[in-house]
Image (cartoon, rainbow, N blue to C red):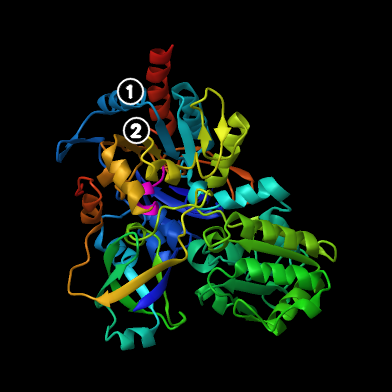
Amino acid sequence: MKFLFNTGRTIRQGSYVERKNAPSYREEASAIRMNPVDMFEMMVEEGDRVRVKSSTGEVVMKARADPGLVRGRVFCSLGPYANHIVSPETHGTGMPDFKVTEVEIEPTQDPVSSVAMLMGQCGGVPYED
Amino acid sequence: MRIEDVVCSFCGCLCDDLVVEVEGTRVINVENGCTLANEKFMGDHRLEAPIRRSGGKWEKVSYEEAIAETAGILLDADRPLLYGWSGTYGEAQTIGVHLAEVLGAVIDNTSTVCHGPSIMAIQEVGHPGCTLGQVKNRADVVVYWGANPVDAHPRHMSRYTTYCDGFFVKNAFRERKVVVVDVRETESSQVADEFVKVNPGGDYAVLSALRAIVRGKRDIIPPDVEGVSREQLFRVADMCIAAKFGAFFFGVGLTMAPGKNKNIRNAIELTEELNRHTKFTISPMRGHWNVYGSNEVFTWITGYPFAVDFARGIAFYNPGETTSVDILRRGECDACLVVASDPGAHFPRACAEHLARIPTVQIDPHVNVTTHLSRIQIPVAVAGIDAEGTAYRMDGVPIRTRKLFQGRYPDDLEVLEKIYAIVKEAKG
Protein backbone atom coordinates (compact mmCIF):
# COMPACT_ATOMS: atom_id res chain seq x y z
CA MET A 1 0.00 0.00 0.00
CA LYS A 2 1.12 3.57 -0.67
CA PHE A 3 1.58 6.11 2.14
CA LEU A 4 2.91 9.60 2.81
CA PHE A 5 5.84 9.30 5.24
CA ASN A 6 6.41 12.04 7.82
CA THR A 7 9.22 12.38 10.37
CA GLY A 8 9.60 14.41 13.56
CA ARG A 9 10.74 14.47 17.14
CA THR A 10 9.36 12.24 19.87
CA ILE A 11 10.18 12.50 23.54
CA ARG A 12 11.43 8.89 23.66
CA GLN A 13 13.77 9.43 20.74
CA GLY A 14 15.05 12.54 22.54
CA SER A 15 15.50 10.61 25.79
CA TYR A 16 17.68 7.95 24.15
CA VAL A 17 19.69 10.39 22.06
CA GLU A 18 22.93 9.74 23.94
CA ARG A 19 22.54 5.94 23.81
CA LYS A 20 22.07 5.37 20.13
CA ASN A 21 23.58 1.88 20.21
CA ALA A 22 20.99 0.78 22.78
CA PRO A 23 17.96 -1.41 21.91
CA SER A 24 15.66 1.27 23.41
CA TYR A 25 16.78 3.80 20.79
CA ARG A 26 16.39 1.22 18.02
CA GLU A 27 12.84 0.41 19.21
CA GLU A 28 11.80 4.06 19.05
CA ALA A 29 13.67 5.15 15.93
CA SER A 30 12.50 2.12 13.93
CA ALA A 31 8.83 2.36 14.94
CA ILE A 32 6.51 3.43 12.15
CA ARG A 33 3.21 4.83 13.38
CA MET A 34 0.19 3.97 11.26
CA ASN A 35 -3.55 4.40 11.31
CA PRO A 36 -5.06 1.21 12.86
CA VAL A 37 -7.47 0.75 9.92
CA ASP A 38 -4.54 0.78 7.47
CA MET A 39 -2.81 -1.82 9.65
CA PHE A 40 -5.98 -3.94 9.64
CA GLU A 41 -6.20 -3.77 5.86
CA MET A 42 -2.56 -4.80 5.55
CA MET A 43 -3.09 -7.63 8.07
CA VAL A 44 -0.37 -6.09 10.25
CA GLU A 45 -0.48 -6.22 14.06
CA GLU A 46 1.23 -3.91 16.57
CA GLY A 47 4.94 -4.79 16.60
CA ASP A 48 4.91 -6.64 13.26
CA ARG A 49 7.74 -5.88 10.89
CA VAL A 50 7.13 -3.99 7.67
CA ARG A 51 9.33 -3.07 4.74
CA VAL A 52 9.17 0.64 3.89
CA LYS A 53 10.30 1.54 0.37
CA SER A 54 10.81 4.93 -1.23
CA SER A 55 12.42 5.94 -4.51
CA THR A 56 15.65 6.41 -2.53
CA GLY A 57 15.90 3.16 -0.57
CA GLU A 58 14.19 0.74 1.76
CA VAL A 59 14.34 -0.19 5.43
CA VAL A 60 12.60 -2.62 7.79
CA MET A 61 10.59 -1.04 10.63
CA LYS A 62 8.07 -2.13 13.27
CA ALA A 63 4.43 -1.08 12.97
CA ARG A 64 2.86 0.88 15.83
CA ALA A 65 -0.82 1.89 15.89
CA ASP A 66 -1.59 5.62 16.11
CA PRO A 67 -5.28 6.59 15.82
CA GLY A 68 -4.23 10.25 15.59
CA LEU A 69 -2.95 9.68 12.07
CA VAL A 70 -5.19 10.06 9.05
CA ARG A 71 -5.40 6.97 6.83
CA GLY A 72 -2.69 6.90 4.18
CA ARG A 73 -0.20 8.78 6.33
CA VAL A 74 2.55 7.34 8.51
CA PHE A 75 4.96 8.90 11.02
CA CYS A 76 8.41 7.91 12.25
CA SER A 77 10.71 9.66 14.69
CA LEU A 78 13.66 11.34 13.02
CA GLY A 79 16.83 9.27 12.99
CA PRO A 80 18.86 6.79 10.93
CA TYR A 81 15.92 4.51 10.02
CA ALA A 82 13.80 7.32 8.61
CA ASN A 83 16.81 8.82 6.87
CA HIS A 84 17.51 5.57 5.08
CA ILE A 85 14.56 6.38 2.79
CA VAL A 86 14.53 10.20 2.71
CA SER A 87 15.88 11.79 -0.49
CA PRO A 88 18.92 14.09 -0.11
CA GLU A 89 17.46 16.57 -2.64
CA THR A 90 17.10 20.01 -1.00
CA HIS A 91 15.64 22.11 -3.86
CA GLY A 92 18.27 24.78 -3.29
CA THR A 93 17.47 25.29 0.39
CA GLY A 94 19.90 22.92 2.14
CA MET A 95 16.91 21.17 3.73
CA PRO A 96 15.76 17.71 2.55
CA ASP A 97 12.05 16.83 2.35
CA PHE A 98 11.85 15.24 5.80
CA LYS A 99 8.07 15.67 5.99
CA VAL A 100 6.74 14.29 2.71
CA THR A 101 8.23 11.10 1.29
CA GLU A 102 6.02 8.81 -0.78
CA VAL A 103 6.54 5.23 0.38
CA GLU A 104 5.20 1.76 -0.20
CA ILE A 105 4.75 -0.47 2.84
CA GLU A 106 4.41 -4.27 2.93
CA PRO A 107 4.63 -6.88 5.70
CA THR A 108 7.95 -8.71 6.01
CA GLN A 109 9.62 -11.35 8.15
CA ASP A 110 13.06 -9.74 7.77
CA PRO A 111 14.63 -8.45 10.98
CA VAL A 112 15.03 -4.80 11.96
CA SER A 113 18.71 -3.91 11.58
CA SER A 114 20.60 -2.46 14.53
CA VAL A 115 21.85 1.11 14.14
CA ALA A 116 25.41 -0.22 13.78
CA MET A 117 24.35 -2.65 11.04
CA LEU A 118 22.48 0.12 9.25
CA MET A 119 25.62 2.26 9.21
CA GLY A 120 27.59 -0.82 8.13
CA GLN A 121 25.34 -0.89 5.05
CA CYS A 122 26.35 2.73 4.44
CA GLY A 123 30.03 1.73 4.38
CA GLY A 124 30.83 2.35 8.04
CA VAL A 125 32.44 0.02 10.56
CA PRO A 126 30.16 -0.82 13.51
CA TYR A 127 31.54 0.21 16.88
CA GLU A 128 30.17 -1.83 19.77
CA ASP A 129 30.51 -0.07 23.13
CA MET B 1 26.77 18.59 46.66
CA ARG B 2 23.52 20.35 45.74
CA ILE B 3 23.74 23.00 43.00
CA GLU B 4 20.86 25.39 42.29
CA ASP B 5 19.91 27.39 39.17
CA VAL B 6 21.64 24.94 36.85
CA VAL B 7 21.12 25.54 33.11
CA CYS B 8 19.89 22.57 31.12
CA SER B 9 21.98 21.70 28.07
CA PHE B 10 19.49 19.70 26.03
CA CYS B 11 17.03 21.77 24.01
CA GLY B 12 16.77 25.43 23.01
CA CYS B 13 14.70 26.33 26.10
CA LEU B 14 17.88 26.34 28.25
CA CYS B 15 15.76 26.06 31.41
CA ASP B 16 17.82 27.72 34.14
CA ASP B 17 16.03 26.53 37.26
CA LEU B 18 17.30 22.98 37.66
CA VAL B 19 18.56 21.75 41.01
CA VAL B 20 21.26 19.14 40.54
CA GLU B 21 22.89 16.88 43.10
CA VAL B 22 26.44 15.78 42.35
CA GLU B 23 28.47 13.00 43.95
CA GLY B 24 32.08 12.95 42.78
CA THR B 25 31.95 12.98 38.99
CA ARG B 26 28.34 11.84 38.68
CA VAL B 27 25.01 13.59 38.78
CA ILE B 28 22.78 11.57 41.10
CA ASN B 29 19.60 13.66 41.12
CA VAL B 30 17.87 16.36 39.08
CA GLU B 31 14.92 18.45 40.26
CA ASN B 32 12.62 20.55 38.02
CA GLY B 33 13.94 18.89 34.85
CA CYS B 34 11.83 17.31 32.11
CA THR B 35 12.41 13.76 30.86
CA LEU B 36 15.04 15.01 28.42
CA ALA B 37 16.93 16.93 31.13
CA ASN B 38 16.88 13.96 33.50
CA GLU B 39 18.38 11.71 30.81
CA LYS B 40 20.93 14.35 29.88
CA PHE B 41 22.24 14.88 33.41
CA MET B 42 21.79 11.39 34.84
CA GLY B 43 22.96 9.49 31.77
CA ASP B 44 26.37 7.90 32.03
CA HIS B 45 27.10 6.52 28.59
CA ARG B 46 30.25 8.30 27.55
CA LEU B 47 32.95 7.04 25.23
CA GLU B 48 35.86 6.11 27.50
CA ALA B 49 38.82 7.23 25.38
CA PRO B 50 39.65 8.39 21.84
CA ILE B 51 39.14 5.65 19.26
CA ARG B 52 40.50 5.14 15.75
CA ARG B 53 39.29 2.89 12.96
CA SER B 54 42.12 0.81 11.63
CA GLY B 55 41.09 -1.37 8.71
CA GLY B 56 37.88 -3.06 9.82
CA LYS B 57 38.56 -2.66 13.55
CA TRP B 58 38.50 -0.03 16.26
CA GLU B 59 41.40 0.70 18.61
CA LYS B 60 41.98 3.10 21.49
CA VAL B 61 44.51 5.88 20.94
CA SER B 62 45.85 8.72 23.07
CA TYR B 63 44.43 12.25 22.88
CA GLU B 64 47.75 13.51 21.46
CA GLU B 65 47.70 10.95 18.65
CA ALA B 66 44.01 11.55 17.86
CA ILE B 67 44.48 15.34 17.79
CA ALA B 68 47.62 15.17 15.61
CA GLU B 69 45.95 12.77 13.18
CA THR B 70 42.84 14.96 12.98
CA ALA B 71 44.95 18.01 12.16
CA GLY B 72 46.78 15.95 9.50
CA ILE B 73 43.48 14.84 7.91
CA LEU B 74 42.25 18.44 7.74
CA LEU B 75 45.55 19.71 6.33
CA ASP B 76 45.60 16.99 3.63
CA ALA B 77 42.05 17.77 2.49
CA ASP B 78 41.27 20.01 -0.48
CA ARG B 79 37.68 20.72 0.58
CA PRO B 80 37.11 19.95 4.25
CA LEU B 81 33.68 20.35 5.86
CA LEU B 82 33.42 21.34 9.54
CA TYR B 83 29.90 20.47 10.65
CA GLY B 84 27.80 20.52 13.83
CA TRP B 85 28.57 22.97 16.64
CA SER B 86 25.11 23.18 18.24
CA GLY B 87 25.86 20.99 21.26
CA THR B 88 28.84 23.07 22.28
CA TYR B 89 29.32 26.58 23.64
CA GLY B 90 30.21 29.84 21.91
CA GLU B 91 33.89 29.88 22.85
CA ALA B 92 34.47 26.52 21.08
CA GLN B 93 32.35 27.59 18.11
CA THR B 94 34.61 30.63 17.72
CA ILE B 95 37.71 28.44 17.36
CA GLY B 96 35.78 26.34 14.83
CA VAL B 97 35.17 29.38 12.60
CA HIS B 98 38.82 30.46 12.82
CA LEU B 99 39.88 26.90 11.97
CA ALA B 100 37.61 26.95 8.91
CA GLU B 101 39.12 30.24 7.77
CA VAL B 102 42.70 29.00 8.07
CA LEU B 103 41.83 25.77 6.23
CA GLY B 104 39.70 27.42 3.52
CA ALA B 105 36.97 25.01 4.62
CA VAL B 106 33.17 25.05 4.66
CA ILE B 107 31.72 25.45 8.15
CA ASP B 108 28.07 24.69 8.76
CA ASN B 109 25.89 24.14 11.82
CA THR B 110 22.83 22.01 12.51
CA SER B 111 20.41 24.81 11.63
CA THR B 112 21.03 23.62 8.07
CA VAL B 113 18.56 20.78 8.87
CA CYS B 114 16.33 22.61 11.38
CA HIS B 115 15.77 26.37 11.11
CA GLY B 116 18.07 27.22 8.19
CA PRO B 117 14.99 28.01 6.07
CA SER B 118 13.72 30.27 8.89
CA ILE B 119 16.95 32.27 8.76
CA MET B 120 16.65 32.54 4.97
CA ALA B 121 13.15 33.97 5.41
CA ILE B 122 14.30 36.34 8.16
CA GLN B 123 17.03 37.61 5.81
CA GLU B 124 14.26 38.46 3.32
CA VAL B 125 11.63 40.06 5.56
CA GLY B 126 13.03 40.49 9.06
CA HIS B 127 12.14 38.98 12.41
CA PRO B 128 9.43 40.56 14.58
CA GLY B 129 10.41 38.49 17.63
CA CYS B 130 10.61 38.98 21.38
CA THR B 131 12.01 37.25 24.44
CA LEU B 132 10.20 34.37 26.10
CA GLY B 133 9.73 36.61 29.15
CA GLN B 134 7.53 38.95 27.08
CA VAL B 135 5.40 36.01 25.97
CA LYS B 136 5.08 34.70 29.51
CA ASN B 137 4.03 38.05 30.96
CA ARG B 138 1.88 39.42 28.14
CA ALA B 139 0.64 36.90 25.56
CA ASP B 140 -3.07 36.04 25.70
CA VAL B 141 -2.98 34.11 22.40
CA VAL B 142 -0.22 31.63 21.57
CA VAL B 143 -0.05 29.74 18.27
CA TYR B 144 2.21 26.70 17.86
CA TRP B 145 2.57 26.03 14.12
CA GLY B 146 4.28 22.81 12.95
CA ALA B 147 5.62 22.34 16.46
CA ASN B 148 5.03 19.73 19.14
CA PRO B 149 6.42 21.25 22.35
CA VAL B 150 5.21 18.41 24.59
CA ASP B 151 7.69 16.08 22.87
CA ALA B 152 10.43 18.42 21.65
CA HIS B 153 10.49 21.24 24.25
CA PRO B 154 8.70 19.65 27.19
CA ARG B 155 8.77 22.66 29.54
CA HIS B 156 7.99 25.38 26.99
CA MET B 157 4.29 25.32 27.85
CA SER B 158 4.81 25.24 31.62
CA ARG B 159 7.51 27.93 31.74
CA TYR B 160 6.22 30.38 29.14
CA THR B 161 2.73 29.71 27.78
CA THR B 162 -0.21 27.41 28.58
CA TYR B 163 0.47 26.60 32.22
CA CYS B 164 2.51 29.63 33.28
CA ASP B 165 0.93 32.68 34.92
CA GLY B 166 2.46 36.02 33.92
CA PHE B 167 2.48 39.63 35.11
CA PHE B 168 -0.46 40.60 32.87
CA VAL B 169 -1.90 37.10 32.56
CA LYS B 170 -2.81 36.15 36.11
CA ASN B 171 -4.56 32.87 35.32
CA ALA B 172 -2.81 31.59 32.22
CA PHE B 173 -4.67 28.31 31.85
CA ARG B 174 -8.01 30.15 31.58
CA GLU B 175 -6.95 33.49 30.09
CA ARG B 176 -4.41 32.37 27.51
CA LYS B 177 -5.78 30.83 24.31
CA VAL B 178 -3.57 28.22 22.66
CA VAL B 179 -3.87 27.25 19.00
CA VAL B 180 -1.95 24.30 17.52
CA VAL B 181 -1.57 23.95 13.76
CA ASP B 182 -0.20 20.62 12.59
CA VAL B 183 -0.63 17.82 10.04
CA ARG B 184 -1.29 15.23 12.75
CA GLU B 185 -2.72 14.97 16.24
CA THR B 186 -0.11 15.18 18.99
CA GLU B 187 -0.14 15.56 22.76
CA SER B 188 0.34 19.29 22.15
CA SER B 189 -2.73 19.48 19.92
CA GLN B 190 -4.74 17.73 22.63
CA VAL B 191 -4.20 20.56 25.12
CA ALA B 192 -4.97 23.31 22.58
CA ASP B 193 -8.13 25.44 22.65
CA GLU B 194 -8.17 25.17 18.87
CA PHE B 195 -6.49 22.46 16.79
CA VAL B 196 -6.12 23.27 13.10
CA LYS B 197 -5.34 20.15 11.11
CA VAL B 198 -3.67 21.01 7.81
CA ASN B 199 -3.02 18.70 4.86
CA PRO B 200 0.69 17.83 4.46
CA GLY B 201 2.29 20.59 2.40
CA GLY B 202 -0.74 22.86 2.86
CA ASP B 203 0.74 25.34 5.34
CA TYR B 204 1.57 28.01 2.75
CA ALA B 205 -2.00 28.11 1.49
CA VAL B 206 -3.45 28.26 5.02
CA LEU B 207 -1.08 31.08 5.99
CA SER B 208 -2.09 32.95 2.82
CA ALA B 209 -5.78 32.46 3.64
CA LEU B 210 -5.26 33.84 7.16
CA ARG B 211 -3.40 36.84 5.71
CA ALA B 212 -6.31 37.52 3.37
CA ILE B 213 -8.83 37.31 6.24
CA VAL B 214 -6.78 39.64 8.43
CA ARG B 215 -6.63 42.02 5.43
CA GLY B 216 -10.44 42.01 5.33
CA LYS B 217 -10.84 39.78 2.24
CA ARG B 218 -13.11 37.18 3.81
CA ASP B 219 -15.26 36.89 0.70
CA ILE B 220 -12.47 35.33 -1.38
CA ILE B 221 -11.82 32.41 1.01
CA PRO B 222 -13.06 29.06 -0.39
CA PRO B 223 -15.04 26.68 1.90
CA ASP B 224 -11.97 24.50 2.43
CA VAL B 225 -8.28 25.45 2.39
CA GLU B 226 -5.94 22.45 2.53
CA GLY B 227 -8.22 20.52 4.87
CA VAL B 228 -9.15 23.53 7.04
CA SER B 229 -12.72 24.83 6.95
CA ARG B 230 -13.43 28.49 6.20
CA GLU B 231 -15.29 28.77 9.52
CA GLN B 232 -12.26 27.59 11.49
CA LEU B 233 -9.98 29.98 9.61
CA PHE B 234 -12.33 32.89 10.46
CA ARG B 235 -12.39 31.76 14.10
CA VAL B 236 -8.59 31.59 14.36
CA ALA B 237 -8.11 34.91 12.56
CA ASP B 238 -10.67 36.59 14.87
CA MET B 239 -8.94 35.13 17.92
CA CYS B 240 -5.61 36.55 16.73
CA ILE B 241 -7.04 39.99 15.86
CA ALA B 242 -8.77 40.19 19.26
CA ALA B 243 -5.57 39.33 21.14
CA LYS B 244 -3.93 41.98 23.29
CA PHE B 245 -0.59 40.35 22.63
CA GLY B 246 -0.14 37.29 20.42
CA ALA B 247 2.83 35.03 19.83
CA PHE B 248 3.52 32.58 17.03
CA PHE B 249 5.98 29.78 17.67
CA PHE B 250 6.86 27.67 14.66
CA GLY B 251 8.74 24.41 14.44
CA VAL B 252 10.39 22.24 11.83
CA GLY B 253 6.91 21.21 10.70
CA LEU B 254 7.06 24.44 8.67
CA THR B 255 10.76 24.54 7.74
CA MET B 256 10.96 20.93 6.52
CA ALA B 257 7.60 20.82 4.74
CA PRO B 258 7.15 21.81 1.09
CA GLY B 259 7.58 25.56 0.78
CA LYS B 260 10.27 25.60 3.49
CA ASN B 261 11.69 29.16 3.70
CA LYS B 262 8.68 30.52 1.82
CA ASN B 263 6.37 29.07 4.52
CA ILE B 264 8.30 31.03 7.13
CA ARG B 265 8.25 34.19 5.03
CA ASN B 266 4.48 33.86 4.75
CA ALA B 267 4.16 33.34 8.52
CA ILE B 268 6.28 36.43 9.20
CA GLU B 269 4.14 38.43 6.77
CA LEU B 270 0.98 37.19 8.54
CA THR B 271 2.54 38.48 11.78
CA GLU B 272 3.11 41.82 10.04
CA GLU B 273 -0.55 41.92 8.95
CA LEU B 274 -1.70 41.20 12.50
CA ASN B 275 0.42 44.08 13.78
CA ARG B 276 -1.92 46.44 11.89
CA HIS B 277 -4.56 45.39 14.47
CA THR B 278 -2.68 44.41 17.63
CA LYS B 279 0.76 43.37 18.88
CA PHE B 280 1.96 40.03 17.50
CA THR B 281 5.40 38.37 17.47
CA ILE B 282 6.87 35.25 15.87
CA SER B 283 9.75 33.02 16.98
CA PRO B 284 11.29 29.72 15.90
CA MET B 285 11.30 26.80 18.34
CA ARG B 286 15.05 26.19 18.18
CA GLY B 287 15.75 22.57 18.99
CA HIS B 288 19.36 21.58 19.54
CA TRP B 289 20.63 23.39 22.66
CA ASN B 290 23.02 26.16 21.46
CA VAL B 291 22.09 26.12 17.79
CA TYR B 292 21.02 29.76 18.10
CA GLY B 293 24.49 30.54 19.48
CA SER B 294 26.15 28.90 16.49
CA ASN B 295 24.21 31.27 14.22
CA GLU B 296 25.27 34.23 16.39
CA VAL B 297 28.95 33.26 16.51
CA PHE B 298 29.14 32.49 12.78
CA THR B 299 27.48 35.82 12.00
CA TRP B 300 29.74 37.92 14.24
CA ILE B 301 32.84 36.50 12.62
CA THR B 302 31.84 35.86 9.01
CA GLY B 303 28.67 37.85 8.39
CA TYR B 304 26.67 34.67 7.67
CA PRO B 305 24.71 32.44 10.08
CA PHE B 306 25.41 28.96 8.61
CA ALA B 307 26.81 27.23 5.50
CA VAL B 308 29.87 29.49 5.27
CA ASP B 309 32.41 28.60 2.59
CA PHE B 310 35.99 29.95 2.94
CA ALA B 311 37.33 28.24 -0.22
CA ARG B 312 37.66 31.62 -1.97
CA GLY B 313 39.65 33.09 0.93
CA ILE B 314 36.63 35.17 1.93
CA ALA B 315 33.32 34.12 3.49
CA PHE B 316 30.74 32.98 0.92
CA TYR B 317 27.20 31.79 1.68
CA ASN B 318 24.71 30.17 -0.65
CA PRO B 319 22.20 27.72 0.88
CA GLY B 320 21.61 24.84 -1.53
CA GLU B 321 25.26 25.02 -2.61
CA THR B 322 27.31 25.50 0.58
CA THR B 323 24.96 23.60 2.89
CA SER B 324 26.21 20.30 4.33
CA VAL B 325 23.56 17.97 2.90
CA ASP B 326 24.22 19.32 -0.61
CA ILE B 327 28.01 19.13 -0.26
CA LEU B 328 27.80 15.55 1.01
CA ARG B 329 25.23 14.31 -1.51
CA ARG B 330 27.39 15.71 -4.33
CA GLY B 331 30.37 13.87 -2.82
CA GLU B 332 32.22 17.17 -2.81
CA CYS B 333 34.08 17.27 0.52
CA ASP B 334 37.14 15.06 1.04
CA ALA B 335 37.26 15.23 4.87
CA CYS B 336 34.78 16.09 7.58
CA LEU B 337 35.15 17.24 11.16
CA VAL B 338 31.93 16.73 13.12
CA VAL B 339 31.63 18.59 16.43
CA ALA B 340 28.77 18.17 18.94
CA SER B 341 26.13 16.79 16.58
CA ASP B 342 25.14 13.59 14.77
CA PRO B 343 24.81 13.87 10.98
CA GLY B 344 24.88 10.06 10.68
CA ALA B 345 21.48 10.01 12.39
CA HIS B 346 20.00 13.17 10.93
CA PHE B 347 21.18 13.38 7.32
CA PRO B 348 19.77 11.25 4.47
CA ARG B 349 21.49 7.97 3.68
CA ALA B 350 23.47 9.32 0.70
CA CYS B 351 25.20 11.77 3.06
CA ALA B 352 26.01 9.02 5.58
CA GLU B 353 27.55 6.98 2.75
CA HIS B 354 29.85 9.84 1.81
CA LEU B 355 30.85 10.41 5.44
CA ALA B 356 31.91 6.75 5.55
CA ARG B 357 33.94 7.10 2.32
CA ILE B 358 36.02 10.09 3.43
CA PRO B 359 38.08 10.54 6.62
CA THR B 360 35.48 11.74 9.12
CA VAL B 361 36.55 12.78 12.61
CA GLN B 362 34.07 13.30 15.39
CA ILE B 363 34.49 15.29 18.60
CA ASP B 364 31.64 14.19 20.87
CA PRO B 365 31.22 12.79 24.39
CA HIS B 366 29.00 9.87 23.32
CA VAL B 367 28.90 6.99 20.89
CA ASN B 368 26.31 7.98 18.33
CA VAL B 369 25.34 7.03 14.78
CA THR B 370 28.19 9.05 13.26
CA THR B 371 30.68 7.03 15.33
CA HIS B 372 30.21 4.05 12.99
CA LEU B 373 31.00 6.25 9.98
CA SER B 374 34.07 7.94 11.50
CA ARG B 375 37.79 7.22 11.36
CA ILE B 376 38.49 8.90 14.70
CA GLN B 377 36.33 9.94 17.65
CA ILE B 378 37.61 12.15 20.44
CA PRO B 379 35.46 12.16 23.60
CA VAL B 380 35.14 15.48 25.41
CA ALA B 381 33.42 16.92 28.47
CA VAL B 382 29.69 17.65 28.19
CA ALA B 383 28.84 21.32 27.85
CA GLY B 384 26.88 22.48 30.91
CA ILE B 385 27.87 19.43 32.99
CA ASP B 386 31.66 19.16 33.16
CA ALA B 387 32.44 22.03 30.78
CA GLU B 388 31.41 25.67 31.07
CA GLY B 389 30.68 28.25 28.43
CA THR B 390 28.06 30.58 26.94
CA ALA B 391 24.99 29.33 25.10
CA TYR B 392 22.01 31.11 23.53
CA ARG B 393 18.41 30.36 24.39
CA MET B 394 15.92 30.02 21.52
CA ASP B 395 14.92 33.69 21.91
CA GLY B 396 18.50 34.96 21.55
CA VAL B 397 19.26 35.45 25.24
CA PRO B 398 22.84 34.40 26.10
CA ILE B 399 23.15 32.35 29.28
CA ARG B 400 26.36 31.28 30.98
CA THR B 401 26.48 27.60 31.88
CA ARG B 402 28.61 26.26 34.71
CA LYS B 403 30.86 23.30 35.28
CA LEU B 404 29.15 21.09 37.88
CA PHE B 405 32.25 19.01 38.63
CA GLN B 406 35.81 18.57 37.42
CA GLY B 407 35.76 15.49 35.21
CA ARG B 408 38.56 13.62 33.48
CA TYR B 409 37.74 14.69 29.91
CA PRO B 410 39.19 17.71 28.11
CA ASP B 411 36.54 20.13 26.83
CA ASP B 412 35.73 21.05 23.20
CA LEU B 413 37.67 24.30 23.43
CA GLU B 414 40.87 22.61 24.62
CA VAL B 415 40.78 19.96 21.87
CA LEU B 416 39.90 22.45 19.12
CA GLU B 417 42.61 24.90 20.22
CA LYS B 418 45.21 22.13 19.94
CA ILE B 419 44.00 21.19 16.44
CA TYR B 420 43.97 24.87 15.47
CA ALA B 421 47.54 25.38 16.74
CA ILE B 422 48.87 22.50 14.60
CA VAL B 423 46.97 23.68 11.52
CA LYS B 424 48.00 27.30 11.99
CA GLU B 425 51.66 26.38 12.33
CA ALA B 426 51.52 24.24 9.18
CA LYS B 427 49.73 26.93 7.18
CA GLY B 428 52.06 29.67 8.42
Residue B20 image position (x, y, % from top left): 46, 52
In the structure shown, which secondary structural element does the residue marked by tag 2 occupy?
A: strand
Q: Residue furthest top?
A: B428
**What residue did someone put label 2 on?**
B335
Crowding near pointer 2: few (<14 within 10 Å), some, many (20+)?
Answer: many
Spot occupied by residue B164 in the image (x, y as percentages of width and height): 65, 67
Query: Which of the 4 image quadrants contains residue B39?
Result: bottom left
| Part of the protein shown in magenta | B340-347
Instruction: Give the residue at the far left of this rendering.
Output: B56
Q: Is residue B92 left or right of residue A117?
A: right
Labelled disc at residue A123: none
Q: Quadrant of residue B67?
A: top left
Q: Amino acid at mark 2?
A: Ala
Query: As displayed, is residue B133 above or below residue A50?
Result: above
Q: For mark 1, does the 10 Å Cα neighbourhood hold few (<14), some (14 to 19), or many (20 or more) residues?
A: few
| Residue at image location 79% in from the left, 65% down from the top | B274
Does the magenta-highlighted stretch encompass residue A14?
no
From where the camera sits, is residue B164 visible? no
Left or right? Give the position of B81 relative to B94. Answer: left
- In magenta stretch: residue B342: yes
Q: Nearer the viewer, residue A104 or B281?
A: A104
According to the image, label 1 marks what residue? B76
Q: Are marks 2 and 1 in contact (CB under 8 Å)?
A: yes
Secondary element at tag 1? helix
Q: Quadrant of the C terminus of chain B?
A: top left
Q: CA distance from mark 2 to mark 1?
A: 9 Å
Comparing A6 with B179, the one in front is: A6
Name which residue lies at 69% across and 72% down: B172
Chain of the residue under the numbered disc 1 shown in the image: B
